[in-house]
Amino acid sequence: MVLLESQIKLKTGDLAPDFDLIGIDDKKHSLHSYIDYEGLLVIFICNHCPYVKAKIEAIKEIHEKFKDKIAVVGINSNDPVNYPDDSFENMKKTAQEKNMKFDYLVDETQEIAKKYGALCTPDPFLFDKQMKLIFHGRIDNAMKPEDVATEKTMIDNLEKYLSGGKIEKDFDPSIGCSIKWKEQQT
């Protein structure tokens, strides 16, 4: 397991890179699929990473609390050949076992992760109604799988955004396993 911290590629105010990906519902999803929401939370996740496993309940809480206003989308960009736990079929199984109700999409070419500059799992990106980046960073302050969160960073930022407030810190790096690239990333 290679532990990485998220890095800045997209800057605050940058538009969300478009995508056209298959979800575990066997339907195509794109940025356009989420235009009726007040915001979009894209989180690069996978099935096997202990950091993601530790955040699934927090992600489900975010989805439940904000599902009428904020679209929550998980994207798995890991190489399923070398990491079979992250295969499309296992994505479906994991989502069912964990009762994940948010969209979970597969990035087979890994191009979407590269466009976003995602490096680790989880790596969350929050966009406003115009699909402009307003926050890139952690879900909460529990930075190791065994830690207990004392601050719900993403929920706090979502509440600020939805109430018209300003998110003070637009980048607060997430930590997790490296995305498992099919080839060496350049």
Image (cartoon, grey):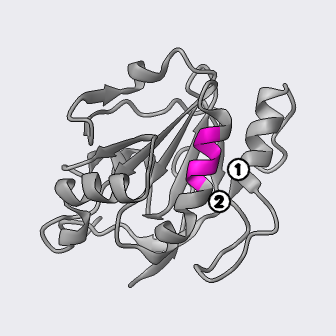
Decide: is 12 above or below 51: above
Residue shown at the point (52%, 29%) measured from the top left: 15
Which of the 4 image quadrants contains residue 55?
bottom right
Q: Position of residue 41 (x, y in %)?
A: 56, 39
Numbered tag placed on residue 182 in the rendering: none
CB under 8 Å between discs 2 and 1:
yes
Front-lying residue, 100 or 155: 100
- Sequence-wise, the earlier of marks 2 and 1 is 2
* Left or right relative to 179: residue 117: right
Farthest-out residue, top = 36
**Distance of mark 2 from mark 1, alpha carbons?**
7 Å
* Left or right relative to 183: residue 173: right
**Quarter placement of the C terminus:** bottom left
Decide: is 6 above or below 136: below
Residue shown at the point (65%, 57%) measured from the top left: 139
Which of the 4 image quadrants contains residue 159?
top right
- Is 87 magenta? The answer is no
Which secondary structure is most common in the magenta stretch?
helix
Numbered tag placed on residue 154 in the rendering: 1
Going by the numbered disc 1, the residue's amino acid type is: Met
Going by the numbered disc 2, the residue's amino acid type is: Arg
Q: Where is residue 22 in the image (x, y as percent from the top left)?
A: 23, 37
Q: Where is residue 6 in the image (x, y as percent from the top left)?
A: 55, 64
Residue shown at the point (63%, 56%) measured from the top left: 137
Q: In this picture, which residue range is highlighted in magenta?
A: 59-64
Q: Count residues near mark 1 (Cα–Cα under 10 Å), then give few for <14, some for 14-19, many for 20+.
A: many
Q: Mark 2 points at which residue?
A: 138
Q: Position of residue 83 (x, y in %)?
A: 21, 73
